[in-house]
């Protein structure tokens, strides 16, 4: 792997830190908002369930971002570069799929599509770099 390729890989994965921070901020604000609302109806119970699922997925995104960072560092240090590069790309794809699930919904994961303008704009502005070529 050339120096330019390694530099490009590192630059691509540094953007994960920004997205991870954004995911965590959205999850925390959503949890704080929902915890302040007393649940009394089925709709509110559903909203709380969705918040829990989204918080879990945001935690998974954080873990995936950390894993990509570690793998990119290993590639940069030329430690089993080919294998770690493949793993990093697989993790990137999973990260992108999860981001798409948060945006559009996924019946298998029991998550509905995002509807809040703030969340939609945050996700849509960050989804393209993670779609596999």
Image (cartoon, helix red, strand yellow):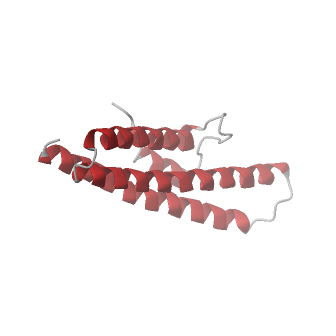
Residue 13: image x %, image y %? 32, 51
Q: Residue at x 18, y 43 (%)?
A: 5
Q: Is residue 81 left or right of residue 124?
A: left
Q: Residue at x 51, y 64 (%)?
A: 25
Question: Quadrant of residue 88 in the image?
Answer: top left
Quadrant of image for the N terminus: top left
Which one is nearer the viewer's eye here, 82 or 99?
82
Residue 47: image x %, image y %? 72, 52
Quadrant of image for the C terminus: top left
Residue 54: image x %, image y %? 61, 51
The residue at the far left in this view is 3
Which one is nearer the viewer's eye here, 82 or 129?
82
The residue at the far top in this view is 133
The residue at the far right in this view is 40
Judge whether residue 2 can be spotted in this image: yes
Q: Is residue 13 left or right of residue 53?
A: left
Residue 71: image x %, image y %? 34, 50
Question: Across the whole image, how many numbered discs are drawn on residues?
Answer: 0
Judge whether residue 128 can be spotted in this image: no
Question: Quadrant of residue 16 in the image?
Answer: bottom left
Q: Residue at x 46, y 50 (%)?
A: 64
Q: Residue at x 19, y 50 (%)?
A: 7
Which one is nearer the viewer's eye here, 48 or 67?
67
């Amino acid at each position: 792997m050339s120096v330019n390729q390694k530099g490009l890989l590192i630059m691509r994965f540094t953007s994960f830190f920004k997205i991870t921070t954004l995911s965590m901020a959205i999850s925390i604000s959503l949890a704080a908002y929902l915890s302040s609302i007393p649940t009394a109806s089925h709709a509110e119970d559903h909203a709380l369930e969705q918040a829990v699922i989204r918080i879990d997925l945001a935690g998974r995104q954080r873990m995936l971002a950390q894993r990509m960072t570690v793998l990119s560092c290993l590639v940069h240090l030329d430690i089993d570069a080919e294998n770690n590069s493949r793993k990093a790309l697989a993790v990137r794809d999973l990260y992108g799929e999860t981001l798409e699930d948060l945006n559009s919904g996924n019946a298998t994961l029991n998550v509905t599509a995002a509807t809040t303008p703030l969340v939609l704009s945050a996700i849509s502005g960050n989804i393209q770099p993670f779609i596999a070529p």
